[in-house]
Image: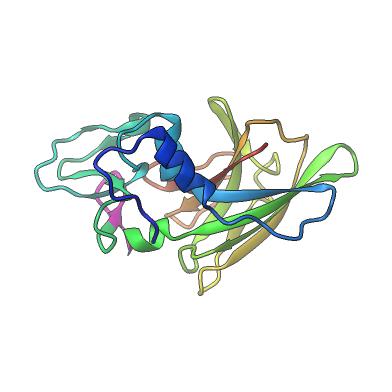
Amino acid sequence: MKALRLGTVPAVALAAWLASAPVAAQVPADAVALSFVPYAAAFSLETRQSELVDPLVFVLAPHAPPGTGLLGIAHLPGIRNARMTDDPMQPALDANGKPLGFDLQHWFAATGVAELGGDPGGRDRVTARFTNLIANGRYSLFLSHGPGFAPLDGGGRANSFTAAPDGTGAIAVISPAPLAHGATLQLVFHSDRTDHAQQRGEIGIYAHVQLTATIP
């Protein structure tokens, strides 16, 4: 697992960390290569957090009071948002303190690349490949632009897949419209192993964004 072990993380250090992610190689001339990075890192940079913090995954913190954490997610006492500088062997929890079945090392180790290319009819085709996902985990690709989000395929019927036992995964999705500059692809892990069609599921409880990539 890759982590910056700093008390405070300036934006320039975060940007350098994000820029070191793998890039897809040998893409067709008319395609765009995208790299997925941990959502915790991208979120921390965008919201100017002082640490690399995950708003959707939690860890034990015996003296932590109940409260409303990042993204307005209410959590029970005795837990807090996970940080990428935490002990990687700590079990990952949901906002109710329920174990998700893996540790932080496995959560933050995921990587992915994608190719973005045109499709007949003015649509966009996204072909993505991932490694180090949660073994046999259920995932969906969503598109976020501003405060809104939607399944990448538009209807929530062809944007999901199950990771292999070795943590690899791949999916090809055709977006119903060209993907806008600055929009982000979100790889959502469903801890309830259930697709939620046009919804991601309850964030921090059943839905946890693991990786994200920005459309150039």
Q: Is residue 141 above or below residue 8?
A: below
- Outermost residue on the left side: it is 63
Along the line of sight, the residue nearer the viewer: 78 or 196: 78
- Outermost residue on the top side: it is 147
132 with respect to 76 (left or right): right
- Outermost residue on the bottom side: it is 166
Along the line of sight, the residue nearer the viewer: 27 or 71: 27
**Is the C terminus in the top left, top right, bottom left or bottom right quadrant?**
top right
Quadrant in the picture for residue 48: top left
121 with respect to 157 (left or right): right
- Outermost residue on the right side: it is 120
Quadrant in the picture for residue 168: bottom right
195 with respect to 73 (left or right): right
- Image mark count: 0
Whether residue 202 is visible, yes or no, is no
Along the line of sight, the residue nearer the viewer: 71 or 41: 41
Residue 183, horizontal then vertical, whole percent: 63, 33
| Rendered image coloring scheme | rainbow
Residue displayed at 67% across by 53% down: 114
Q: Is residue 161 above or below residue 144?
A: below
Residue displayed at 82% across by 39% down: 123
In the image, the segment drawn in magenta is 92-103
**Is the N terminus in the top left, top right, bottom left or bottom right quadrant?**
bottom left
Magenta span has 36?
no
Magenta span has 100?
yes
Residue displayed at 37% across by 43% down: 56
Residue displayed at 17% across by 35% down: 66
Whether residue 19 is visible, yes or no, is yes
Residue 107, horizontal then vertical, whole percent: 40, 58
Residue 65, horizontal then vertical, whole percent: 13, 36
